[in-house]
Structures are given as C-alpha cells and as structure tokens.
Image: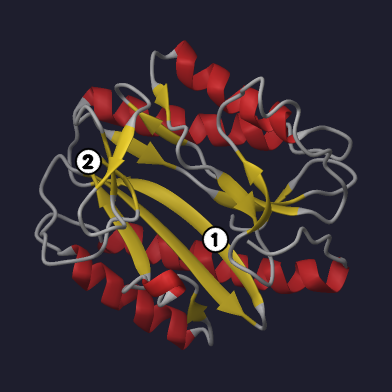
Amino acid sequence: MSRLTVKNAAEIAKMRAAGLIVRDALELLGRSAKAGVSTLELDAIAAEFLGSRGAKASFLGYNGYPASICASVNSQVVHGIPDGYKLREGDILSVDIGALKDGYHGDAARTFFIGRVADEARKLVEVTQECFFLGAAEAREGRHIADISRAVEAHARKHGYGVVRDLVGHGIGRDMHEPPEVPNFTDARIGRGLRLTKGMTLAIEPMINMGGWQVRQEANGWTVVTADGSLSAHYENTVAITDGEAEILTL
C-alpha cells in the first residue's frame, strides 16, 4: 500500500469526476441486473460504459484480478469474479466497481435486489446502507477513524448482524488503495486510529453478514464468502474530508 495523501481542491475535483463515472456505472448495472442475466454480461456492460466515459476499470489487472467489476452473489461477501452464473429471482448481488480517470480513482459498491427478495434479505441490504451513512456522518475533520468504525459496528450489531473483520475500507486517490485502513469494527489494539484532516479521501465500505462475522476465501484466491453460508451485503462510497460534512464523491 502506498503512502497517505492529502488532496488539494484540484485533485478532489478529479476524484469527483471519477466518482460520478462510478455512480453512473452502478446505476446502469442496477438497471441491467435482472434474473437470467449473467454476471459476466454485467462485467461487459461495465467495461463498455467505462470506456465510453474515457475511464479505465480500476480493478482490471489489479494484482492479477481478471475483470472490471466484482460481482458477489448471496453469501459471497466481496471479490466475486464475473462468470457464467445467471442471476435468479430472489438473489442479492453486490457489485463493486472502480474507475480511473485523469490519474485518480473512484470506488463504490451497491447491493442490488434481483426481482422479489425475502424480507430478511431486504432488511440486511437496507441496514448495510444505513451503516455507511452513519459512518460517513462521523467522517469529519478532527475526528478519528474509530469514530467511523464505531458508528458502523453499533448499527449492524443493533440488528444482530455480523460485521466482517477480515476486510476493511481504505484511503484512495492516485492509488486504488492508500492508507489509512478504515475498519467497520472497533478493537482495542487498533485504538482511535488516524485523526481525520481536510483533504483526506476514504473509501468507507460496510460489509455486513446476516450471520456471523467470519469469512473464508474460495479456491480462486479472490472470492470471499461467509463462513456460515449466510447472506452478505456491501455498500461503499468514496468520501472527501472537508471542513464540514464529508463530501460523498460517488453519489
């Protein structure tokens, strides 16, 4: 991971442009994700869209990753590799996508409903999104990383959900992953974490499981799934620390 960077207004403007491409790509993918559509087809849609906006897929080739998006279905937490799997009525699909434009990255994720889903699945997705916004509300100059983590964790646990501990959010800018790490949980060993300053840019990304927090990696070396087979949801945005409320660059 590269060094921590604080961005100036011109750099944040470039990240905002990349972030809006990510936002638009996710909106397109949300409309396209239907029963009978394969995750590989969604990957092709994303790749074509990013190219049409003069952007590159941040994920493609990253440490050897073979696709433009991560497409994680049901018990897959993150890093699902698009393939021939055709989405089914009742699935939930987490799509994570990054865009590189003019030297800067935007990164965001959404979990989509495929047709009519079970009430418990809908609640999980909604609570995961709420976790993000509660965490983002703490992303203010002078506060600490742990303030974000605490807000996410408390809301998830209030609903009886597991908060993934093996994967965390991150800084972002010229590099896809920069310091600092942004956990969705608190830990005495981590402490308060870094103090937030204006110009820092973070990818805050709650990954919340219906069951326990434990996960495992599949044999492909990428896809992470819940250890107990329970559903998982993911919601992420890139945010910039300002002198007031954080600016969400991917909304």
- Which quadrant of the structure image shows residue 200? bottom right
Dot 1, crowdedness within 10 Å: few (<14), some or many (≥20)? many
| Viewer-side residue, 60 vs 121 | 60
- Which quadrant of the structure image shows residue 186? top right
Residue displayed at 72% across by 35% down: 145
Where is 50 relative to 241, above or below? Answer: below
Dot 2, crowdedness within 10 Å: few (<14), some or many (≥20)? some
Image coordinates for residue 199, horizontal then vertical, percent: 84, 56
Image coordinates for residue 236, horizontal then vertical, percent: 52, 47
In the displayed structure image, the side of residue 227 where residue 49 appears, left or right: right
Image quadrant containing the N terminus: bottom right
Where is 186 relative to 246, above or below? Answer: above
Image coordinates for residue 125, horizontal then vertical, percent: 37, 34
Residue displayed at 66% across by 20% down: 188
Mark 1 is on which residue type? Asp
Residue displayed at 84% across by 74% down: 10
In the displayed structure image, the side of residue 35 where residue 41 appears, left or right: right
Mark 2 is on which residue type? Asn
| Viewer-side residue, 193 vs 33 | 193
In the displayed structure image, the side of residue 195 where residue 69 appears, left or right: left
N-terminal of the pair, mark 1 or mark 2, is 2
Residue displayed at 24% across by 58% down: 33
- Which disc number belongs to residue 107? 1
Image coordinates for residue 128, horizontal then vertical, percent: 45, 32
Disc 2 is placed on an element classified as loop
Where is 171 relative to 84, above or below? Answer: above
Disc 1 is placed on an element classified as strand
Mark 2 sits on what residue?
Answer: 74
| Viewer-side residue, 173 vs 17 | 173
Residue projecting furthest to the front: 189
> Would you say the residues marked 1 and 2 are in contact, meaning their CB atoms lie under 8 Å apart?
no
